[in-house]
Image (cartoon, coloured by chain):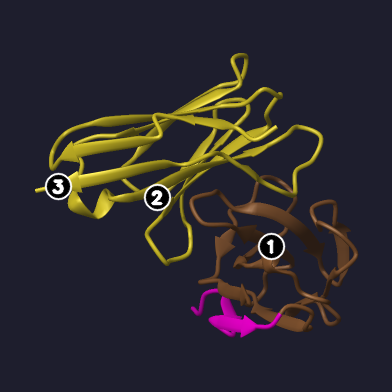
Chain colours: A brown, B yellow
Amino acid sequence: GAGVSQTPSNKVTEKGKYVELRCDPISGHTALYWYRQSLGQGPEFLIYFQGTGAADDSGLPNDRFFAVRPEGSVSTLKIQRTERGDSAVYLCASSQGTGESDTQYFGPGTRLTVL
Amino acid sequence: QQPVQSPQAVILREGEDAVINCSSSKALYSVHWYRQKHGEAPVFLMILLKGGEQKGHEKISASFNEKKQQSSLYLTASQLSYSGTYFCGTEPPYNTDKLIFGTGTRLQVFP
């Protein structure tokens, strides 16, 4: 079946602008995760959804970052007043959501560049 | 809090073996291993659970020492396709939802 998909694949924006990044998880997966990956680093956890609710948002760096998953499937990561330091690859992953060390399957990511 | 991986980089000839280590300063419930090629998504390799259970689907083996809070990934008879950056993702016992990824090990296999 289809894997995790993310759109857009690349996003270039100017400092101060608002951006939305979309993630479409594997069908039937109830858990969805957002990570951020800077060049040469491992993915850094941002937020985790179980169904429609954010079960853990402890990784969001500040209140400019917000994510939603209104119907328990597609999720959108929203970044307000973007800063150059927000430039990174934003990865989305999904899992079955049993809560017991499920395999997380990653999407191809959205490369965000803030000029 | 970020797990430390060693070595940082490995260069191999096809057919050679390699070991990649992942060490955490905190207690662990499980360790997940991923391989990422340049510009691509991380690809799942294996999960090692506290208690010894392993879940994986490739010809790669690994160990998990719960007491030492360490895991090792064993790549035998390496192939060109093994090239990439390997990350361990650790899951603490009190929080089974997010992964804390390690510093990464870059592996290059040459013919």
Which range is magenta?
A1-14
State the mark number for residue B57. Answer: 2
Front: mark 3 or 2: 3
Name the amino acid, label 2.
Answer: His
Q: Subunit of mark 1?
A: A
Seen in the picture, residue B14 relative to B70 is either above or below; the reply is below
Share a chain, discs 2 and 1?
no
Name the amino acid, label 3.
Answer: Phe
Q: Where is mark 3, residue-wise?
A: B110
Who's the residue at 59% across and 58% down the image? A37
Q: Quadrant of residue A94?
A: bottom right
Q: Position of residue A98 (x, y in %)?
A: 73, 54
Who's the residue at 69% across and 62% down the image? A85
State the mark number for residue A85. Answer: 1
User: Along the horizontal axis of the image, is B48 left or right of B59?
Assistant: right
Seen in the picture, residue B77 relative to B27 is either above or below; the reply is below
Magenta stretch holds residue A66: no
User: What is the CA distance from the residue labelled 3 to the residue labelled 2?
Assistant: 24 Å
